[in-house]
Image: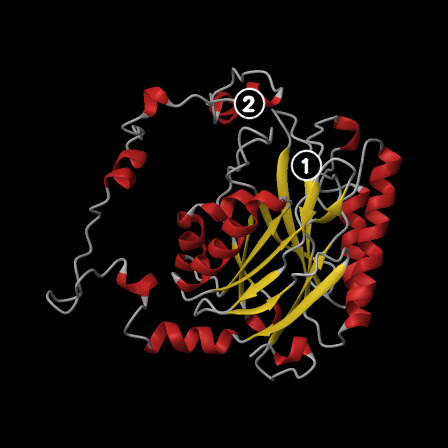
């Protein structure tokens, strides 16, 4: 069920639109201003497209394209004109919006930042990408965790970005913190098409959580992004899928957070988000609640190490033209605390 693309809205439904935005070329501040205006125009299109739409989602790199340019002149700030324009558009059209910016960082490389703004123009979610797509992306690693908010109709929303979704731990963290709908924005190109599809489905099914996922679309003359908007229900079934590759198309479906809540409470078989922490509860009261996973224990102890660690060839961004880093993660925080 997808409510025929939101045309038949349930009283309990949340209608989400995923905009397969044309991949831009942004080199100068004027380019950035034009692209910001284009995104604002498409917020208006979303409202006109579906009167009952609750949330319009734009892909990662919606403002900056895929150049990986870290030029400070085209980086954004939270109090800058780009974010202000997004807030004004959401308030004007009375719609929630999910946006992407590359955010200036005075202490290192820029952050790849995602924002959710409500229908009054208030910032409700601020997220920094945890897993930049190495070795291709130069962004600072996210350092604020994964926030979960009350979105439209009280639906619990989380946002992750692109490569984040290839780590099952990211989706599990979203669900563990209560997310009923996980948004995944991306700039992926065609070689990732198959893994994009099955991870969007597995992230949903393994956590009894709907996922709403969208990439940039079209060509910038160098790269070809794939669109591939997907809305996946909590049972892993795809209920809307943008397969045409048509730029600026908005793929729409209705999700039912109330049914997600019902499944999480009443499912026995395959209630994996619960059963993960209650292993074999048929045999032992409450299930085993230990942590038998070596990689988790090692990560917590700061000694995560693969059996083939010494053989890994690509361990920095030099293969993609970036200088080898010298800073250690968290260094600026530790210095500020001294």
Which residue does the image show at 20% across and 60% down from the upper left?
Answer: 279
Q: Of the residues under marks 2 and 1, which one precedes in the sequence?
A: 1
Tag in front: 2 or 1: 2
Q: Nearer the viewer, residue 229 or 167?
A: 229
- CA neighbours of label 1 inside 10 A, class few (<14), some (14 to 19), many (20+): many
Determine the image quadrant of residue 322. top right
| Label placed on residue 10 | none
Q: Nearer the viewer, residue 180 or 324?
A: 324
Q: Is residue 210 left or right of residue 223?
A: left
Q: How many marks?
A: 2
Q: Is residue 125 above or below residue 30?
A: below
Q: How is the image coloured?
A: secondary structure
Q: Is residue 215 above or below residue 230?
A: above
Q: Position of residue 162 (x, y in %)?
A: 57, 46
Q: Which residue is mark 1?
A: 103
Which residue does the image show at 83% across and 64% down from the upper left?
Answer: 44
Which residue does the image show at 70% across and 37% down from the upper left?
Answer: 66
Q: Is residue 304 left or right of residue 30?
A: left
**Is the residue under label 1 in contact with that under label 2 (CB below 8 Å)?**
no
| Label placed on residue 317 | 2
Which residue does the image show at 82% across and 65% down from the upper left?
Answer: 45
Distance CA(mark 2)–CA(mark 1): 20 Å
Q: Dot 1 lies on which element?
A: strand
Q: Nearer the viewer, residue 1 or 45?
A: 1
Q: Dot 2 lies on which element?
A: loop
- CA neighbours of label 2 inside 10 A, class few (<14), some (14 to 19), many (20+): some
Q: Is residue 66 left or right of residue 47?
A: left
Q: Quadrant of the N terminus?
A: bottom right
Q: Position of residue 16 (x, y in %)?
A: 64, 67
Q: Position of residue 321 (x, y in %)?
A: 62, 19
């Amino acid at each position: 069920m997808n409510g025929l693309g939101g045309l038949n809205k349930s009283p309990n439904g949340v209608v989400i639109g995923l905009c397969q935005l044309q991949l831009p070329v942004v080199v100068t501040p004027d380019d950035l201003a034009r692209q910001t205006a284009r995104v604002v125009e498409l917020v208006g299109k979303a409202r006109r497209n579906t009167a009952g739409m609750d949330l319009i989602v734009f892909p990662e790199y919606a403002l900056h394209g895929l150049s990986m340019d870290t030029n400070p002149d085209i980086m954004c700030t939270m109090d800058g004109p780009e974010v202000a324009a997004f807030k004004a558009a959401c308030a004007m059209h009375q719609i929630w919006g999910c946006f992407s910016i590359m955010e200036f960082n005075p202490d290192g490389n820029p952050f790849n930042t995602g924002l959710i703004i409500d229908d009054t123009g208030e910032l409700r979610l601020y997220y920094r990408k945890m897993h930049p797509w190495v070795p291709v992306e130069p962004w600072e690693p996210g350092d604020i965790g994964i926030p979960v908010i009350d979105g439209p109709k009280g639906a619990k929303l989380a946002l992750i970005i692109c490569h984040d979704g290839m780590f099952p731990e990211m989706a599990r963290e979203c669900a563990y913190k209560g997310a009923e709908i996980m948004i995944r924005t991306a700039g992926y190109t065609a070689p990732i098409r198959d893994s994009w599809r099955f991870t969007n489905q597995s992230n949903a099914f393994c956590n009894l959580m709907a996922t709403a996922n969208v990439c940039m679309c079209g060509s910038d003359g160098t790269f070809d992004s794939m669109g591939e908007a997907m809305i996946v229900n909590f049972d892993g079934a795809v209920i809307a899928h943008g397969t045409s590759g048509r730029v600026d198309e908005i793929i729409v479906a209705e999700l039912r957070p109330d049914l997600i809540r019902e499944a999480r409470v009443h499912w026995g078989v395959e209630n994996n988000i619960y059963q993960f922490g209650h292993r074999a509860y048929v045999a032992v009261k409450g299930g085993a609640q230990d942590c038998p996973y070596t990689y988790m224990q090692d990560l917590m102890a700061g000694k995560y190490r693969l059996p083939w660690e010494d053989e890994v060839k690509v361990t920095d961004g030099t293969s993609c033209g970036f200088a080898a880093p010298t800073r250690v993660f968290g260094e600026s925080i530790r210095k500020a605390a001294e």
